[in-house]
Amino acid sequence: MYLSRVLCVSIWLTVGVVAFAQNESDSIRQLREVVVVANRYHEVIPSQKLSGNALKALGSFSVADAIRYFSGIQIKDYGGIGGLKTVDIRSMGTHHTGVFYDGIPLGNAQNGQIDLGKFSLDYIGEISLYNGQKSEIFQSARDFGSAGTIYLRTLRPRFAEGEQTHVKTSFRTGSFGLVNPSVLWEQKLGEQVSASFNAEYVYASGRYKFRYRKLLHDGTTAWDTTAVRKNGDIHSLRLEGGLNGATEQGTWDVKGYFYDSERGIPGAIINNVWKRSQRQWDRNFFAQGSFRKAWFAGYDMLIRLKYAGDRMRYLNPDTTLMYIDNTFRQQEIYASVANKYAIRPYWDISLSADYQWNALDASLQDFVYPERHTALVACATAFRWKQLKAQASLLGSFVFEHVSVANARKPDNKQEYTPAVFLSYQPSGQHNFNLRAFYKRIFRMPTFNDLYYTDVGNISLRPEYTVQYNTGFQYSKSFAHTLIRDVNLRADAYYNEVTNKIIAVPKGNGQYRWMMMNIGYVEIRGIDISGQIGWQLPHDIQLHTSLNYTYQKAQDFSDPSDNAPQSGTYGGQIAYIPWHNGSAIAHLNYKSWSLNYSFIYVGERYHNSSNILQNYEQPWYTHDLAVRKTFDRKKIKYILSVEVNNLLSQYYDVVQNYPMPGRNYKLVFKVEI
């Protein structure tokens, strides 16, 4: 009943906006040949972006590898090519990060984590990172619903005059027994329609040397040895295809994605156990589409649809621990309608309504087979007057749970309203210098695992809230006939609060039984600084440099009573968040040659909020180097590149007891027709 009322109100509001816009446009003569392709408002809070040659030059293997170079980012990497890789923006937790694929959200209602290692860069044209939310009011309601968002935009075919077909193939090989062929085919089907298809296969043994050290409480070394990481192999196949087209004053696209993999889970190195035998199988599929059209002057509509089905099997055959063979199946249906109307040339309003259905089936004892219905309604406005730009939004979230087992308990339905305000001001029209600030309050629902996992889940969990405050500036300038051609500088200071944080705590007296609880409270203070400089050197040499730095003080204030000087967690830096981290990139182009150097530094941190010596994690850093040469022969382009990662072969852990590989190599050969 509640869901039907919310959907009826959403549809009524959408129809009302359309009718109002139609009445306002009766006296406006339309120019049929005009297609609206850009937003008149520049970004209020600019994003961090990697695209084009800058993205290709990094030599990164997956999306997760590339995102490491953004400021304010922490990547949890469990090691190797096949290891799980998740992202955390400004220490608010992985679950507060929204990931969008061509504008449509990627979801995981089971555990809330998106494994970015499943997405190859071969089919990605641009990666964007937004703090707060995307500075665009013409978007689906889901876009307003995360504390931070990552947008992955796939390559859209582009053809020069007379071109009909593009084919790009690549083959990677190197350390860990890597075998990685891929092919991208693009075809022009008509004046306004094109198709693309991408296939990629990955095999790697996952075997690499690592260093295993144990320090005693007084700082002396108990043991220090080198071993080989085992059971880290992966076989995966990824298939993607899509159609893109344009209509009169509009665009549309449809896309399909399929991923199938089997991987070993090498596990943690604990108590001199060097090899684990756990295995995981993943099969993911989704089909999605979007349609955008400017119906008449001032009014635009955007429709998005998606279906996703995921299957994951986890096997632990080790009976000395606990034999486990669990299978999980997820389904998701997503639909969105967004409307935007220009009241004045400087003032836009928007209304969007989304519906999402999630269901989980699991081979767990006493499982309740939950379903979740989510309705989202977002109202937003964007205003620009001289040097001032402002955006404001209000998101209404309505969540309804259902379980299939009679008399089983379920959480209460949720109804939340969360606001956001973004401001940008340019003090002088003579200089490209902008001041900016934003406030946002948002929440995330407990996952199905948090609520229903057998003997662990807690159906009394409340949503986890974040409040964000941000202020900063950006300055950019271009120069002519000088050594430095362009400069872009930005800095932000922020304060975040995370309340009702969901954490696992021991259940009863034993440490082997756990349950989920709302007892967490975290305060995060930080500074992000980044700068990019483009250089024009003699002999037609181009140099692009980038530097990013983040300082964060993320403190755990969950339990005031846990404040013992030598072991308390109250006020401690939360797990795996360094006080200092940063990256540097230098990309050099000379004719058909390119050289790329990148550096990542992660400072000291602790693997527990109890900031004591036993929990201390040393800083780590990596140097990566890539050299590329391009050959052109009769309209065929050949590209050969050699990549060396972790050049100095530093041994380190991103996550405790999950050692990362030392120096490793890749040889890449590409052909583009």
Image: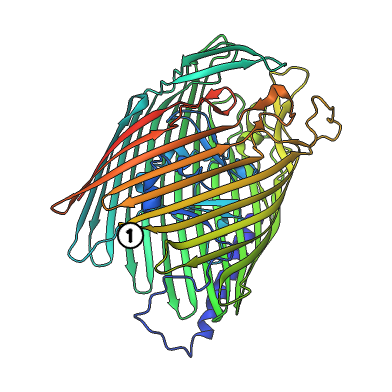
Report the residue at 48% width, 90% height from top.
27
Q: Residue furthest bottom?
A: 27
Residue lying farthest to the top in this orientation: 320
Position above or below: 80 against 551: above
Image coordinates of residue 552 in percent, x first then y, are 67, 44
- Tell me if residue 100 can be seen: no
What residue type is disc 1 on? Asn
Residue 482: x and y in percent read: 42, 65
Circle 1: is it few (<14), some (14-19), or many (20+) Cα within 10 Å? many
Q: Is residue 74 left or right of residue 479?
A: right
Q: Is residue 239 above or below residue 243?
A: above
Foreground residue among 300 and 480: 480
Secondary structure of the residue carrying tag 1 is strand
Q: Position of residue 18 (x, y in %)?
A: 53, 75
Q: Which residue is mark 1?
A: 244
Looking at the image, residue 354 lies above or below residue 512: below
Name the outermost residue toward the front. Answer: 538
Is residue 528 or residue 244 the one in the foreground?
528
**Figure coloring:** rainbow
Whether residue 600 is visible here, answered yes or no, is yes
Q: Quadrant of residue 601?
A: top right
Q: Is the N terminus in the top left, top right, bottom left or bottom right quadrant?
A: bottom right
Q: Position of residue 194 (x, y in %)?
A: 27, 59
